[in-house]
Amino acid sequence: MKPKSKRELILEAATKLFIEHGYGVSMDNIAKQAGVSKQTVYSHFSNKDSLYEVCIADKCQQIYLMEEAFGDERLLPEVLFEFGLAFHKFMLSYEAQSTFKAAVSQQESHPNLAKAYLNAGPERTGQRFAEFLTRRQAARELREGIDTHQASVQFLLMCHGRAVIHRQIGQTLKESDKEKRHYIQECVNMFLAYYGA
């Protein structure tokens, strides 16, 4: 296995510390965690803001693993269900919740960081999903003339669900796996009842 580069070590350390302690973590601590000098950290990232932005973007990349389903040729309801469920579970994960909270906590002092989160996560995912819907619309699986970007936002927000909102304020909505799957299936049914061909 190829050893990790110093940049990879810094990102790994910074992401871990930002998630655990928020934006207030020092560059000294990041360097120590990564096993490199502070000068090495600054040679890769000019300041903490730029390092934080890259960490956010890198963490948001995880959702693109789910987007592999977008190239799938299975029936649309099945693809929508699989992606919707994966998206919902990802949004409930500790890492996704911590990344969101870290971005929100800096919105007044560092608005560019909150914007970086928005662009790397919700905006990019919405755009990719809209492109998928456009392809399926061309295949006559969705109605003609619909706004696929709006449809994308609506589906993602439905799949987001109230459980994610509860988690964001430190509460847990007790739902079984069966209940989560049922909720996502209902989202798919509602979506296709309106947008389906």
Image (cartoon, grey):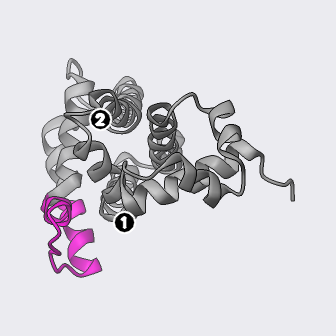
Residue 56, image x, y percentages: 44, 42
Is tag 1's residue or tag 2's residue first in the polypeptide sequence?
A: 1
Which quadrant of the structure image shows residue 124? Answer: top left
User: Seen in the image, is 61 located left or right of residue 179?
Assistant: right
**Residue type of the residue flagged with mark 2:** Ala
User: Residue at left 26%, top 35%?
Assistant: 152
Residue 24, image x, y percentages: 37, 50
User: Residue at left 34%, top 58%?
Assistant: 98
Residue 94's label in the rendered image is 1
Q: Which residue is mark 2?
A: 114
**Residue type of the residue flagged with mark 1:** Tyr
Q: In the displayed structure, would residue 79 be above or below residue 151?
A: below
The residues bearing labels 1 and 2 have C-alpha atoms spaced at a distance of: 18 Å
Residue 38, image x, y percentages: 65, 44
Can residue 8 be found in the magenta stretch?
A: no
**In this orientation, which residue lies closer to the viewer: 79 or 68?**
68
Tell me the magenta residue range. 162-186
Q: Is residue 97 visible?
A: yes
Q: In the displayed structure, would residue 7 be above or below residue 97?
A: above
- In the picture, the quarter occupied by the C terminus is top left
Q: Secondary structure at mark 2?
A: helix
User: Seen in the image, is 159 located left or right of residue 31?
Assistant: left
User: Seen in the image, is 131 located left or right of residue 176?
Assistant: right
Can residue 170 be found in the magenta stretch?
A: yes
